[in-house]
Amino acid sequence: MDPRQRRQPPLGGRAYELNDETPVYVISVAAQLSGLHPQTLRQYDRLGLVSPDRTAGRGRRYSARDIELLRTVQELSQTEGINLAGIKRIIELENQVAALQARVAELAGVVEGAAVAMQQREAQVHASYRRDLVPYQDVQQAGALVVWRPKRASE
């Protein structure tokens, strides 16, 4: 078997996991996929619109998410007529909204967990009640007046 045909796992023995965040595209491929010139990609990087990962040699590596962002920047610029500063602000605000939505979801999970814990604790307390207790009906809710009179010694 040709050694070039064998796929070697990376150091550590685990296979690579590819997802939308994995930086795999060099600038020329990213330019082709996004429909932009490589110099435009460099300019967007300098402006902070798209921040690709870097290799040890400082080469840019773009992910699928970066490519999608490049397409979005181009669309906002060409079809909507938004300048690059406006596009940068839009991207920042969208990132902030996404972060806040993630935080809200996290806090909702915490609240839900606290509610479940409270219900479990309440169930434990109710289970510990003595069964010889009689529930008391509030007089004001019943609309009746009860007067207690001690028994007289003569009765």
Image (cartoon, rainbow, N blue to C red):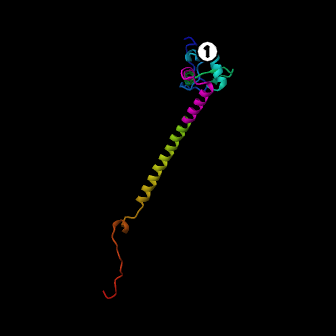
Give the image quarter of residue 32: top right
Foreground of the two, 106 or 146:
146
Label the magenta part by its dominant secondary structure.
Answer: helix
Q: Residue furthest bottom?
A: 154
- Quarter of the figure that contains the N terminus: top right
Foreground of the two, 108 or 1:
108
- Quarter of the figure that contains the C terminus: bottom left
Give the image quarter of residue 38: top right
**Residue 132 shows up from this direction:** no
- What x and y, as percent, mark residue 86? 60, 28
Segment tinted magenta in the rendering:
74-97
Residue that appears at 68% across and 21% down? 58
Q: Does 148 appear above or below 102?
A: below
Q: Is residue 94 magenta?
A: yes
Q: Is residue 66 magenta?
A: no
Q: Does 145 appear above or below 108?
A: below
- What x and y, as percent, mark residue 80? 54, 23
- Element on which disc 1 rests: loop
Foreground of the two, 7 or 21:
21
Foreground of the two, 120 or 114:
114
Q: Residue furthest top?
A: 2
Q: Residue furthest front?
A: 81
Q: Residue furthest right?
A: 57
- What x and y, as percent, mark residue 133? 38, 67
Q: Is 7 positioned to the left or the right of 57 in the image?
A: left
Residue that appears at 41% across and 62% down? 129
Residue on which disc 1 sits: 37
- What x and y, as percent, mark residue 99? 56, 36
- Could you tell me the amino acid type at mark 1? His
